[in-house]
Amino acid sequence: MKGHPLLEARELTVRFGGLTAVDAVSAAFGAAELVGIIGPNGAGKTTFFNALSGINAPTQGELYAGGQRLTGAAPHRFAEHGVARSFQTPRVFHGLSVAANVGFGLQFAGRRRREVPTWLRDEAAILALIGLGGQQDRPAGDLTPSQQRLLEIGMALATRPRVLLLDEVAAGLSELELRQMGQLISRLRAELDLTVIWIEHAVSTLLHHVERVLVLHQGRKIADGTPAEVARNAEVVEAYLGDEMVETA
Ligand SMILES: Nc1ncnc2c1ncn2[C@@H]1O[C@H](COP(=O)(O)OP(=O)(O)OP(=O)(O)O)[C@@H](O)[C@H]1O
């Protein structure tokens, strides 16, 4: 990895009372990486994301964005350093139009970061990119759940991120929508040079698109490698993947 990683966790631990949700996890994410995070329910994936975006302060360990220490900083400081995220349940403003939702993200980004790639210069460009072109005037609450997920990605893109954290954006999608979501995420990385870190329970879709995958289990990182390496990892198979993944790897 050349220079500083765009986002880095060093020995990151998050505890809730006596429960260690994230246990000394270290991981560094470089430019234009597409990385998956998998693990059983309760493995600590969302808590890890919450720490990586400043929503939960870590109990121990350090966070850096572009070499700048951000441990304990508020979410807006992470946003200033180019970290944007989606949530497990889309958080769009139902009463506002689709365009206004994206406009909110553009305003949030403000003028802090001067370079503005053409693809996110305005609402229309972002909506076209995420496949919601022509929907700009509809109230966001009228969109289907899968369109709301796309809109939430659009809102995150509008903050002009370098790193996009996606939390289960494929949950509840049809087969076709799932394929389209996978293609969109691949395009964000390939065409826009974004670093995408993607939590997903739809493991086979995820492994099809990412080149690197982290596996969390009981808060610990038990693997970090290519999908093929991870699928061969005995601890991962035992903890999570089972025989099925070994056969398809
Ligand atoms: N705010 C909180 N207070 C107390 N415990 C929490 C809190 N948030 C998460 N936990 C606990 O931390 C552990 C990790 O939860 P987390 O949601 O990060 O896992 P996950 O891997 O994202 O799970 P899932 O795949 O089900 O979304 C779980 O035992 C959960 O109950």
Image (spheres, rainbow, N blue to C red):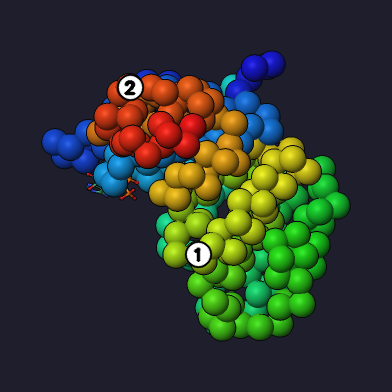
The answer to whether residue 208 is left or right of residue 214 is right
Real-space Cα distance between discs 2 and 1? 30 Å
Which of the 4 image quadrants contains residue 18?
top left
Q: Is residue 208 among the parts visible in the rendering? A: yes
Q: Residue at x 66, y 83 (%)?
A: 138
Please report whichever mark, 2 or 1, sits nearer to the chain's N-terminal start.
Answer: 1
| Residue 173 badge | 1
- Indicate yes or no: mark 1 CB to ligand 1 under 8 Å: no
Work out whether 202 lies above or below 40.
below
The answer to whether residue 138 is left or right of residue 192 is left
Query: Measured from the top left, where is residue 145 in percent x and y?
Result: 51, 72
Pointer 1 local density, CA inside 10 Å: few below 14, some 14–19, many at least 20: some
Q: Residue at x 77, y 65 (%)?
A: 128
Q: Is residue 64 among the parts visible in the rendering? A: no
How many marks do you count on the picture? 2
Work out whether 136 lies above or below 115.
below
The answer to whether residue 80 is left or right of residue 37 is right
- Provide the secondary structure element on which disc 1 rests: loop
Query: Measured from the top left, where is residue 106 in percent x and y?
Result: 70, 59
- Provide the secondary structure element on which disc 2 rests: helix
* Residue wearing tag 2: 234
Q: Which of marks 2 and 1 is in front?
A: 2
Query: Measured from the top left, where is residue 22 in percent x and y?
Result: 30, 33
Pointer 2 local density, CA inside 10 Å: few below 14, some 14–19, many at least 20: some
Q: Residue at x 64, y 49 (%)?
A: 185
Q: Which residue lies furthest to the front in this view?
A: 247
